[in-house]
Amino acid sequence: MANLYITIKQASKILGVSPLTLRNWDKNGKLKAHRHPMNNYRVYKIEDLEGVINEIETNSGLRKSTIEEVHKLIVRHLKEDQ
């Protein structure tokens, strides 16, 4: 992936949860946010999102996506965001 990190808004759209949920997940350690060095905003690693998506699919009994499928999902959402 070209961008290693994405914004909280992009991550919330990809995962289908609110930014407040992501803040709570960060606080509880479920999905740890990183901080942008210039503005200290929360940013998320794409590989961390992939892990959460796979965990959700595994726990819900859905078919486990391949990494390529997850990448396509993330790219689609990022394009819609532009």
Image: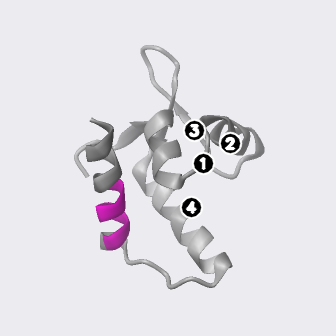
The local secondary structure at tag 3 comes to loop
At horizontal 69% and vertical 52% (from top left) the residue drawn is: 30
Question: Mark 1 sits on what residue?
Answer: 17
Name the amino acid type tagged 3: Ala
Q: Amino acid at mark 1?
A: Val
Q: Amino acid at mark 2?
A: Thr
| Residue 44: image location, x then y, percent | 48, 41
Which mark is nearer the camera, 2 or 3? 2
- Tell me where the magenta segment starts and ends, as one range: 69-74
User: Which residue is disc 3 drawn over?
Assistant: 33
Q: CA distance from mark 4 to mark 1?
A: 12 Å
Coordinates of residue 78 in the picture (x, y in percent): 31, 45
Give me the residue at 44% from left, 46% from top: 45
Label 2 packing within 10 angstroms: few (<14), some (14-19), many (20+): few
**Reading the chain from its start, which is encountered first: label 1 or label 3?**
1
Single out the residue that lies furthest toward the front: 80
Say which label, 4 or 1, has the lower sequence index. Answer: 1
Report which residue position mark 4 lands on.
Answer: 52
